[in-house]
Amino acid sequence: MQRKCCECHKVLGDIAPFSDGRVTHGLCVDCLAKAMKLRIIYLKRIFGDRKRTFGVLMDKNGPFAVTLEDPWLDNQKNISCIPAGSYLCVRKQSPKFGDTFEVRKVRGRSHILIHKGNTEKDTHGCILVGKEFNFLHGEPGILESGDGFNEFMSKMRCVDRFLLKIEEV
Ligand SMILES: [Zn+2]
C-alpha cells in the first residue's frame, strides 16, 4: 500500500502488503511538527568537499551557530552525512556526550546525534556544532565547539523535541 500524508498529500512510501494498490494515510514530519507547534531549526549546508560538509544553524531570528558533518558518501554508516530533509529531533542523554538531541528516523541510519567536536575526525555521521569556521592543526574545522554547543542547548532548554530541516544551499 502507498502511504500518503493526510495534510499535504506527500507520498511517504510503500508499506506491506505491497501488492495492495490502495492508499493509506499518516502525517509527514513537517505536518506533524506543525500540528505539534514544534520549533523549527534549519541546517543550511553551505559548502562541502571530499572530507567534510560545512553548514549554518538558523532559527527564525537568523543564524546562530556553524556545523560540521561528514561528506556525502551515499548515506553510508559512520562516514557519510545524513540525507537532506526534515527530521524530528528528540532530547537524549548520551553516555558519551551527555544531554543532547538525537536525529530520529534517518533512513538506514541510527545513533545520529548533535554534539560538539572540531574536525571530521570527531563526527561519525553526526552533526557537530561550533561558533566559527577555522583551521585546527592545519585542518579545516569548526572552533569554540563547547561554547557553540552550549548556546544551542540553551536555546533548546525549554523543549524536548524540535524539527530539523536540513537543506543543501
Ligand atoms: Zn504533510
Image (cartoon, grey):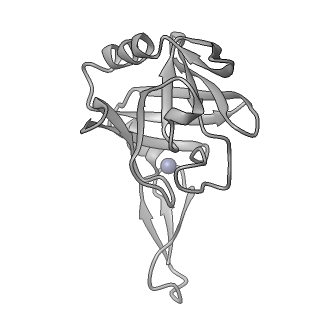
Q: Position of residue 59 (x, y in %)?
A: 50, 18
Compared to residue 168, the image places residue 131 above or below, namely above
Q: Looking at the image, how many numbered discs can be counted on the residues?
A: 0
Quarter residue 52 falls in: top right
Q: Which residue does the image show at 70% across and 38% down from the upper left? A: 51
Q: Pick the residue in front: 34 or 115.
A: 115
Say which residue appears at 36% left-offset and 31% top-offset. 38
Judge by depth and name the residue closer to the eye, 12 or 120: 120
Left or right: residue 50 versus residue 141 is right
Which residue ends up furthest to the bottom in the rendered image?
19
Left-right relation of 102 to 2: left
- The picture places residue 46, in percent across and down from the top left corner, at 71, 26
Please identify the quarter of the rendering in which residue 136 is found: top right
- Residue 132, image x and y in percent? 58, 11
Query: x%, y% of residue 145?
Result: 46, 16
Q: Residue at x 24, y 39 (%)?
A: 95
The residue most toward the right is 49
Q: Quadrant of the C terminus?
A: top right
* Rendered view: 14 above or below 135: below
State which quadrant residue 74 falls in.
bottom right
- Residue at (51%, 10%) from the top-left corner? 61
Q: Tell me if 99 is positioned left or right of 75 in this view.
A: left
